[in-house]
């Protein structure tokens, strides 16, 4: 599974591809299909999700099957690079910290809005740090460790299996980001994509939360055990609760989403997020990714 290390190195060195990204094309296709097929039913949503996730994953698997071993694993590394968003996450989170350090709330609010779906117009410094750290922690699982986990699981069927698994996860995660809203438009049609994303992110979320416990100790474990159940997301809950506990900060709380006030429980423990905590969250994620990558490589050697 050296392909995992190669993919992570490409992400660290180059970040996301500039000018063109396959997911942009995929997103355009998904938008057109949704407009044509969304009749407000779950069955149409399931059909669209199966087509958009299963179709490309099958094509990728077939293409990789015909490659020699070295090019096949190189293709897996490229897919991991396209799927992992560690550098992009840092590139979006650090401008929030920089703007807050300069006392520029307007810029910080704009930067935070690129990370979260909640309304940022009225957020103060603490709320902006809290939202940014929550996004960093949550995305550490579905945008970084999950592609590594699925590469490892898929590798049981060789490079074609790894390529298909990484592709399926990333496309399902993208569809959830597009369709997984509890609005009149997507309440039914987007439900299959949201449920599939929950299933595919389940193992990575638990592994990520467990690594936060490794670095955060008993406090992180207690926050995960006692608080995750009250969170709305079955995967974000363990990750954010354990991560907040590892950082020794309190996250969560009410927020405004699409103009509506939503009550959310407090998670973690300790003080509110302060200056330097966004960088601490990114450092925690880096340690977690290093540990998970090491485990995946070891898995490949067994």
Image: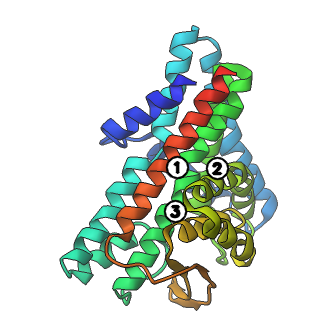
Q: Residue at x 75, y 59 (%)?
A: 195
Label 3 sits on residue: 137
Question: Which is closer to the viewer, label 2 or label 3?
Answer: 3
Secondary structure of the residue carrying numbered label 2: helix
**10 Å neighbourhood of mark 2: few (<14), some, or many (≥20)?**
many
Label 1 sits on residue: 288
**The one of 5 and 157 positioned closer to us in this rendering:** 5
Residue 100 coordinates in the image, percent (x, y): 26, 77
Label 2 sits on residue: 172
For the residues labelled 2 and 3, the Cα–Cα distance comes to 19 Å
Q: Residue at x 51, y 35 (%)?
A: 80
Which residue ends up furthest to the top in the rendered image? 68
**The one of 21 and 31 positioned closer to us in this rendering:** 21
Q: Residue at x 56, y 79 (%)?
A: 269
Secondary structure of the residue carrying numbered label 3: helix
Disc number placed over residue 145 in the picture, else none = none
Instruction: Locate residue 299 relative to residue 104 in the image: left or right.
Output: right
Residue 129 coordinates in the image, percent (x, y): 39, 76
């Amino acid at each position: 599974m050296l392909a995992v290390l190669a993919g992570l190195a490409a992400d660290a060195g180059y970040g996301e591809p500039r000018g063109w990204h396959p997911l942009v094309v995929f997103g355009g296709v998904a938008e057109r299909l949704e407009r044509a097929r969304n009749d407000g039913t779950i069955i149409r949503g399931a059909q669209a999700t199966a087509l958009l996730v299963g179709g490309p994953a099958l094509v990728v698997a077939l293409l990789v099957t015909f490659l020699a071993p070295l090019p096949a694993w190189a293709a897996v590394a490229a897919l991991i690079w396209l799927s992992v968003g560690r550098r992009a996450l840092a590139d979006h989170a650090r401008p929030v910290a920089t703007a807050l350090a300069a006392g520029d709330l307007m810029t910080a609010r704009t930067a935070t809005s690129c990370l979260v779906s909640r309304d940022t117009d009225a957020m103060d410094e603490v709320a902006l740090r809290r939202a940014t750290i929550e996004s960093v922690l949550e995305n550490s699982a579905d945008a970084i460790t999950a592609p590594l986990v699925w590469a490892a699981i898929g590798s049981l069927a060789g490079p074609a299996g790894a390529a298909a698994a990484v592709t399926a996860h990333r496309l399902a995660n993208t569809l959830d980001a597009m369709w997984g809203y509890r609005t009149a438009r997507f309440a039914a049609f987007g439900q299959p994509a949201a449920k599939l994303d929950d299933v595919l992110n389940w193992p990575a979320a638990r592994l990520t939360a467990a690594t936060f416990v490794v670095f955060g100790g008993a406090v992180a474990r207690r926050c995960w055990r006692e608080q995750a159940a009250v969170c709305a997301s079955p995967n974000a809950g363990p990750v954010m609760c354990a991560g907040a506990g590892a950082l020794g900060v309190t996250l969560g709380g009410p927020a405004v989403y699409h103009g509506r006030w939503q009550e959310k429980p407090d998670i973690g423990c300790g003080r509110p997020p302060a200056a330097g905590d966004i960088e601490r969250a990114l450092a925690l994620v880096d340690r977690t990714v290093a540990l998970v990558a090491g485990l995946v490589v070891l898995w490949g050697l067994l």
